[in-house]
Image: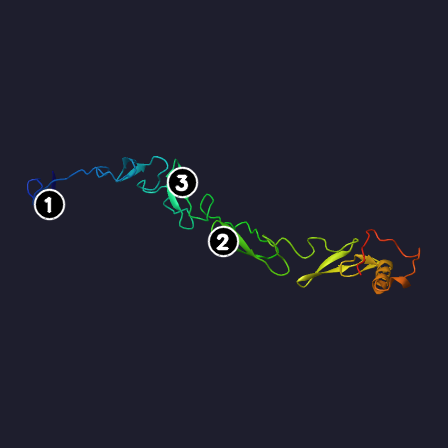
Amino acid sequence: IFLAGVTGNHTLGYTAIDDISVGDNVCEDLCASNPCLNDGICTVKGNSFKCDCPRPFSGDRCEEDPCTSNPCLNAGVCSVNGNGFKCACWTPFFGERCEEDPCTSNPCRNDGNCAVIENSFKCACREPFFGEKCEEDPCEANPCRNDGNCTINGNSFKCACREPFFGERREEDEGHHLFISIICNSKHNLKHYIATKSLPVFPKARQLTS
């Protein structure tokens, strides 16, 4: 019970109190309403309260957990897992937070453009590159023979030949080319063909057809 009033005039050393009102002074327990969530323990601290939160919960009232901040990307579903979280990812995403997809690692080489296709990827290659990951080019198969140097030329290739070789793929030297020309020019009239030991020998035999 508390008294509220004002001090008035007095005599004989006594204090007179006017306009006295009487009321109930209720002592409220700040933890009575169970403000701490998720089994947090409430304790009164002065004019306020404090929540001691069990793991993995946190916050002033233990209202937060590892999924509160929505850590799962790309619409992944978050669930509390022990003191942490776990993401259930939608296809084709994966990773701890569903942050990765088949194109995340940049699998397409030579500036190829990667596109996610279902659970995999597909590379759109810039010419002249080709292959599953745009890893191949016209020089990949070493088309230039006899130690020729292959360079990409537009959408094709070009061979830089070492003497005495020449040709698109450097398969013949000048002597062989001359020998082939003689035979090709004479194959329909072989009776005029004259053999000579000065002509070079082919590494592989070639059959003539009439």
Whether tag 2 and tag 1 are in contact, CB under 8 A, the answer is no
Q: Which residue is mark 2?
A: 116
Amino acid type, callout 1: Gly
Whether tag 3 and tag 1 are in contact, CB under 8 A, the answer is no
Percent across and percent down for residue 43 are 28, 35
Label 2 or label 3, whichever comes before in sequence order:
3
Percent across and percent down for residue 9 are 8, 46
Whether tag 2 and tag 3 are in contact, CB under 8 A, the answer is no
Viewed as shown, does residue 156 lie left or right of 118?
right
Viewed as shown, does residue 14 lie left or right of 193?
left
The quarter of the picture where the N terminus appears is: top left
Q: CA distance from mark 3 to mark 1?
A: 60 Å
Circle 2 Cα neighbour tier, 10 Å, few/some/many (<14 / 14–19 / ≥20): some
Q: Quadrant of residue 163?
A: bottom right
Q: State the residue at coordinates (37%, 39%).
A: 80
Q: State the residue at coordinates (64%, 54%).
A: 136
The extreme left residue here reads 11
Amino acid type, callout 3: Phe
Residue 5 badge: 1
Q: Which residue is mark 3?
A: 85
Q: State the residue at coordinates (47%, 51%).
A: 118
Mark 2 or 3: in front is 2
Percent across and percent down for residue 148 are 78, 55
Whether 181 is drawn above or below 16: the answer is: below
The quarter of the picture where the C terminus appears is: bottom right
Label 1: which secondary element: strand
Label 3 or label 1, whichever comes before in sequence order:
1
Label 3: which secondary element: strand
Residue 72 badge: none
Percent across and percent down for residue 156 are 68, 61
Q: CA distance from mark 2 to mark 1?
A: 80 Å
